[in-house]
Image (cartoon, coloured by chain):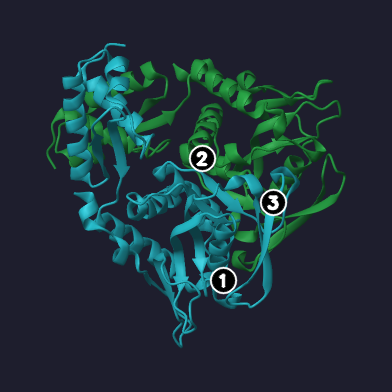
Chain colours: A green, B cyan
Amino acid sequence: MKMKRSGRLVDMTRYLLTHPNTIISLTRFTERYESAKSSISEDLNIINECFERQGVGKLVTLAGAAGGVKYLPFVKKEAAEAFLHRLGETLSDPGRLLPGGYLYMTDVLGDPSIVNEIGRLIASIFIHKPIDVVMTMETKGIPIAYATASQLNVPVVIVRRSSKVTEGSTVSMNYVSGSSKRIQSMVLPRRSLRPGANVLILDDFMKAGGTMKGMMNLIKEFDARPVGAAVLMETKDAEHKLVNDYVSLLRLEELDENGSLSVEIGNYFNYYGEDDAS
Amino acid sequence: MKMKRSGRLVDMTRYLLTHPNTIISLTRFTERYESAKSSISEDLNIINECFERQGVGKLVTLAGAAGGVKYLPFVKKEAAEAFLHRLGETLSDPGRLLPGGYLYMTDVLGDPSIVNEIGRLIASIFIHKPIDVVMTMETKGIPIAYATASQLNVPVVIVRRSSKVTEGSTVSMNYVSGSSKRIQSMVLPRRSLRPGANVLILDDFMKAGGTMKGMMNLIKEFDARPVGAAVLMETKDAEHKLVNDYVSLLRLEELDENGSLSVEIGNYFNYYGEDDAS
């Protein structure tokens, strides 16, 4: 339908935001709004300028036959810092401490607005990497995996602790938990990962990294490639971590003698590319 | 910062879409854009007109001290029908049939764009109901629960099959699976549901409804109230369902003699309020 600029701006903004990291041909817009390519290009400039100024992402134009425009989500540094600082404070409540050095995060992970923001932060790091699929282990990492995958426009595969009738045939693997040293198993449906796929591994919590290491090995079993890893919270352990290259949004520091917790910003900003935003 | 109308429209559209079902005071916008209330009201009229014309939701203005504007997501009927029809066709592949009358849906539930659309469809039904929290049982229902809760702007609680150290103290309950007749248990962290909360129950798949019935009883254990239920897929069983009042987006019909599947649209449109959109 024919539309004025004001209506086009609203509808294009909505469309771009709900289709992140997706190439949209300009023809789609010219036909949808019965408008000239030049008008659509001007609209896209206005939208891009606004997104960049607010630090919420940018539009990239791709030339050629397969060309079009692509919205890349991005969280600007100050916004990411403010968010992680607030979240760290919420999680620093000593009442959250659980046996075994775990932290009660169920309420925080149950809040979709927090989880979606975590997804945008993680996506900001990996948006320029070639990622085909996001992997997580059930259960707590699932919302973070979907929030991130939504922004990256890729599917999610969920590793389970035991095989389910609803998943068809599966590949199973044993691994040793890094902190408890117990043997555990992980199971993935056979048809859920194709050979050569580039996999981003996400999880909510990492102690020694045994689960993450297990997922890396599982990915190799499928002849796929682990190309990145991120966790919401890592613990600052004296003991050796089983994985080296991962992004942590937050870090749980040791308790002091008064039993008070301290949650700091993790290594996130070591991976954060300021250039990517400009 | 001071902004022209075109920039305001882009930024307000983005803000409203990422804060559904949330009252936003007009002052927030007048201050953010250093603009007069009359200009902001005009902007909101333009956005609302566009949203309604595209059938993606509407803006509601609330007068008074606690007033402001609220974006209510909505999927228009033709779009909902087209989406469910396409999804039903995808799921009708006989290769998806698993032992026990289950259906392989892992790939579909792993696609965030599909899951987010399912969430918008379910939210369209419940957006005018007083819902405080969305509940689901691990694992497959989790993405649908988050996608819906994001649109309703409420938290998610996840019922688990056994208690975890990371959840703190829990309430456990046994229930009988409606189809397998086995005794199973469900566990919910004690601090995850407050008395009197209005709970929307979501799940991916329902046969006889034993899991859903169990969740309803668990909610009552917490002195909370089940106020609605929805599943992506129900099976058309001759046997009696254990719950009556639920929304199903799709329905798996019996196999015919050739072993071919048929997936039809469920009872969704019996609950769909056309008036809510206008």
* Mark identifier at residue B48: none
Q: Amino acid at mark 3?
A: Thr
- Counting from the top left corner in percent of width and height, residue A136 is at 64, 45
C-alpha span from label 3 to label 2: 27 Å
Chain holding disc 2: A
**Looking at the image, which residue sits at the far bottom?**
B257
Q: Amino acid at mark 1?
A: Gly
Mark 3 secondary-structure assignment:
strand
- Counting from the top left corner in percent of width and height, residue A88 is at 63, 24
Q: From the viewer's side, name the closer residue of B80 and B67.
A: B67
Q: Kindly indicate the quadrant of the structure image that contains residue B19.
A: top left
Q: Nearer the viewer, mark 1 or mark 2?
A: 1
- The residue under the point 37% across, 39% down is A18
Dot 1 and dot 2 residues touching (CB under 8 Å)? no
- The residue under the point 32% across, 21% down is B28
Q: From the viewer's side, name the closer residue of B214 and B59.
A: B214
* Mark identifier at residue A147: 2
C-alpha span from label 1 to label 2: 30 Å
Q: From the viewer's side, name the closer residue of A229 and B51.
A: B51
Q: Give the quadrant of the N terminus of chain B.
A: top left
Q: Nearer the viewer, mark 3 or mark 2?
A: 3
Answer above or below: position of B51 versus A49. below
Residue A44 seen from this side: no
Answer above or below: position of A196 versus A101. below
- Counting from the top left corner in percent of width and height, residue B200 is at 46, 55
Crowd class of label 1 (few under 14; some 14 to 19; many from 20; radius 10 Å):
many
Q: Which residue is mark 1?
A: B210
Left or right, A54 with respect to B30, comes to right
Q: Amino acid at mark 2?
A: Ala
- The residue under the point 41% across, 51% down is B119
Q: Which residue is mark 3?
A: B170
- Counting from the top left corner in percent of width and height, residue A144 is at 57, 40
